[in-house]
Image (spheres, rainbow, N blue to C red):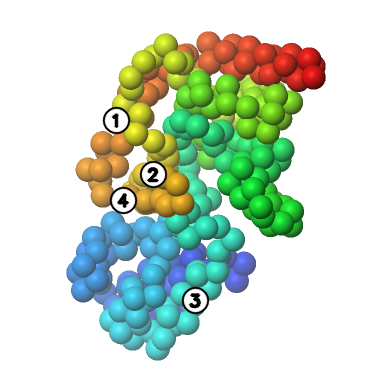
């Protein structure tokens, strides 16, 4: 019988738990579906835990320890997963985003976090918390900018953003901040690091008027959809639901300007912001 699977000590707690879960499940001779039955979850969900795209919860860890005779391993290590630099409603989505191969996002009001500049992110957090101490805003901004390190790889993940025209014109932080923020998006797109499309006001009604949408695809796990509203978020893995949101995104892309026309609009609005700044 094979010995325990070697784990990379530099791995995240989520990756370590996933690797150990796969090792112990294989050792027990259980399929993903069989392990999921006592927890009332699907085999694909077990696969997401094993691949590190989903966060293991303490009650699930307790069941794994019991079923796989793990002597408390999963509960002990699950505590580390509770320590996140992200808000509770976004933590699991952020962790999934970090291992995604493709990220598609519709932004109705704000530039997506991955694409924000420091000044823009700071202005967003100050708007959210107008009376917060400066060090709190500093910490929030640093965490947000850290997410952008995903873009340091020249090809992975593929990031495709559809930006509502309201995102381009709303002066978050003032005209100078907006001009810089939009030029940052232009730079990323022209360097072929992201795909950016603008959804103009002239498109009228569209499939995602109810709010934002993020879709994440992975090399070794089913896709996820993330919906966010004020202070809350939902990470969804039901195949039928995710397929429905994938269609929603396809409809948005069809209603948006082409990438070339989108960059022209973004550049034009950036120049408008810059011109307005010069008038002050």
Q: Which mark is residue 237?
A: 4
Numbered badge on residue 37 = none
At x 39%, y 36%, the residue is 211
**Percent position (x, y) of residue 118?**
71, 40
Height in image: 255 above or below 10? above
User: Which-is-in-front pick, marks 2 and 4?
Assistant: 2
Farthest residue in the bottom direction? 71
| Mark toward the start of the polypeptide (1 vs 2) | 2
Marks 1 and 4, how far apart at CA: 15 Å
Question: What secondary structure is found at the residue carrying circle 2?
Answer: strand
* Tag 3–tag 1 contact (CB < 8 Å): no
SS category of the residue bearing label 1: helix
Residue 27 in view here: no
Decide which of tag 3 and tag 1 comes sooner along the chain. Answer: 3
Indicate which disc, 2 or 4, sits on the residue closer to the N terminus.
2
Residue to which mark 3 is pinned: 79
Residue 220 position within the rendered picture, expressed as x and y whole percent measured from the top left: 39, 51
Report how far apart the C-alphas of labels 3 and 4 lie in the structure.
23 Å
Crowding at dot 3, Cα within 10 Å, few <14 / some 14-19 / many 20+, comes out as some
Q: Which mark is residue 247?
A: 1
Q: Are marks 1 and 2 in contact (CB under 8 Å)?
A: no
Marker disc for residue 227: 2
**In this view, the mark in front (3 or 2):** 2
Residue 203 seen in the figure? yes
Q: Position of residue 272 (x, y in %)?
A: 67, 14
């Amino acid at each position: 019988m094979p010995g325990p699977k070697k784990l990379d000590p530099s791995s995240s707690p989520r990756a370590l738990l996933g690797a150990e879960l796969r090792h112990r499940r294989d050792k027990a001779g259980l399929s993903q579906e069989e392990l999921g039955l006592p927890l009332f979850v699907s085999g694909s969900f077990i696969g997401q835990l094993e691949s590190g795209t989903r966060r293991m919860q303490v009650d699930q860890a307790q069941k794994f320890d019991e079923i796989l005779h793990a002597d408390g391993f999963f509960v002990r290590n699950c505590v580390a997963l509770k320590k996140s630099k992200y808000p509770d409603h976004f933590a699991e989505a952020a962790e999934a985003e970090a291992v995604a191969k493709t990220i598609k996002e519709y932004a109705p009001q704000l530039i997506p976090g991955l694409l924000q500049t420091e000044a823009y992110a700071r202005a967003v957090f100050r708007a959210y918390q107008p009376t917060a101490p400066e060090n709190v805003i500093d910490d929030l901004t640093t965490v947000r900018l850290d997410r952008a390190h995903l873009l340091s790889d020249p090809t992975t993940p593929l990031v495709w953003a559809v930006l509502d025209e309201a995102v381009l014109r709303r002066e978050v932080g003032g005209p100078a901040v907006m001009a810089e923020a939009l030029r940052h998006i232009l730079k990323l797109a022209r360097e072929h690091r992201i795909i950016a499309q603008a959804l103009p006001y002239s498109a009228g009604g569209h499939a995602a008027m109810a709010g934002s949408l993020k879709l994440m695809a992975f090399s070794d796990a089913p896709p996820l959809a993330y919906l966010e509203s004020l202070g809350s978020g939902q990470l969804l893995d039901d195949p039928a639901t995710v397929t429905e949101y994938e269609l929603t995104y396809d409809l948005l892309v069809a209603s948006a300007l082409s990438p070339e026309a989108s960059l022209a609009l973004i550049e034009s609005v950036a120049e408008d912001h810059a011109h307005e700044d010069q008038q002050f």
